[in-house]
Image (cartoon, helix red, strand yellow):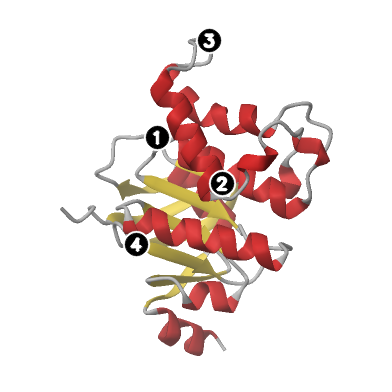
């Protein structure tokens, strides 16, 4: 069964009284990859934050059929470089949505964690501390943590920015695999090639919707 679309209607939102998004209405196709594109300050990260439930709409609605808490992957630069936690412990945090903070991991939880480590090709890093990894390795760990949450909505803020080619390829493959499994994926990107690989594209400028639809058409119009 096809995952239901997410309908965004008349959405306005911002931070501490500062408006960022203005009357945005768009459709995010369910079970596919949607790329959010636009210049810096266009509202891409704010839209992700609203979809994640981190900030609420000032006006408008978001209609989403899924009941699982969205999984959000922030840019790896947002993670404190001295965080004293291992790769395996970081990925295990993705299971908190199911187990809670204080309950012990089950055999099923550990299986999911191992599968996510393998999917991002970081199983050999499981015992390494997060602060000893390269930027690309950290971003793969953050995506593995999100996948371990087993959400039906995966949100990513510029997931391939500044990554080496191997990490870029691993992240891209994991995104495509998640969508193929029925997960709705939304990612903000400045990479035109990443946007072209999406199923759907949403172009924002100045906090307003400029265009949406097939990536090739939207990106051509954006020029």
Residue 177 pos. (x, y %): 41, 57
Q: Residue 102 carries which label?
A: 3
Q: Quarter of the image holding residue 57?
A: top left
Query: Are the two marked residues, 4 and 3, in contact with CB atoms closer than 8 angstroms?
Result: no
Q: Is mark 1 on a helix, strand or loop?
A: loop
Categorize mark 3 by other alpha carbons within 10 Å: few (<14), some (14-19), many (20+).
Answer: few
Label 2 and label 1: CA atoms lie apart by 15 Å
Q: Which residue lies furthest to the front in this view?
A: 124
From the image, state whether disc 2 or disc 1 is nearer to you: 2
Front-most of residues 214 and 87: 87
Q: Which mark is residue 32?
A: 4
Label 2 and label 4: CA atoms lie apart by 17 Å
**In the picture provided, is 198 more to the left or to the right than 127?**
left
Label 3 and label 1: CA atoms lie apart by 19 Å
From the image, state whether disc 2 or disc 4 is nearer to you: 2
**In the picture provided, is 159 more to the left or to the right than 50?**
right
Counting residues from the start of the chain, the first of labels 1 and 4 encountered is: 4
**In the picture provided, is 53 more to the left or to the right than 192?**
left
Q: Residue 143 carries which label?
A: 2
Q: Quadrant of the C terminus?
A: bottom right
Q: Residue 105 carries which label?
A: none
């Amino acid at each position: 069964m096809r995952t239901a679309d997410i309908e965004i209607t008349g959405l306005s939102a911002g931070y501490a009284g500062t408006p960022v998004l203005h009357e945005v209405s768009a459709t995010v196709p369910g079970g596919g990859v949607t790329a959010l594109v636009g210049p810096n300050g266009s509202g891409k990260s704010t839209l992700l934050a609203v979809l994640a439930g981190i900030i609420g709409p000032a006006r408008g609605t978001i209609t989403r059929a899924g009941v699982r808490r969205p999984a959000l992957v922030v840019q790896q630069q947002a993670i404190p470089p001295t965080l004293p936690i291992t790769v395996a412990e970081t990925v295990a945090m993705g299971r908190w949505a199911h187990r809670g903070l204080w309950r012990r991991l089950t055999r099923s939880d550990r299986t999911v964690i191992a599968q996510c480590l393998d999917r991002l090709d970081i199983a050999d890093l499981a015992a390494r501390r997060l602060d000893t990894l390269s930027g690309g390795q950290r971003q793969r760990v953050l995506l593995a943590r999100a996948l371990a949450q087993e959400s039906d909505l995966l949100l990513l803020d510029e997931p391939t920015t500044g990554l080496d080619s191997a990490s870029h390829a691993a992240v891209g493959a994991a995104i495509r695999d998640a969508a193929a499994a029925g997960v709705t994926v939304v990612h903000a990107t400045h990479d035109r090639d990443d946007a072209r690989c999406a199923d759907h594209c949403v172009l924002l400028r100045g906090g307003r919707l400029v265009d949406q639809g097939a990536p090739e058409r939207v990106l051509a119009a954006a020029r």
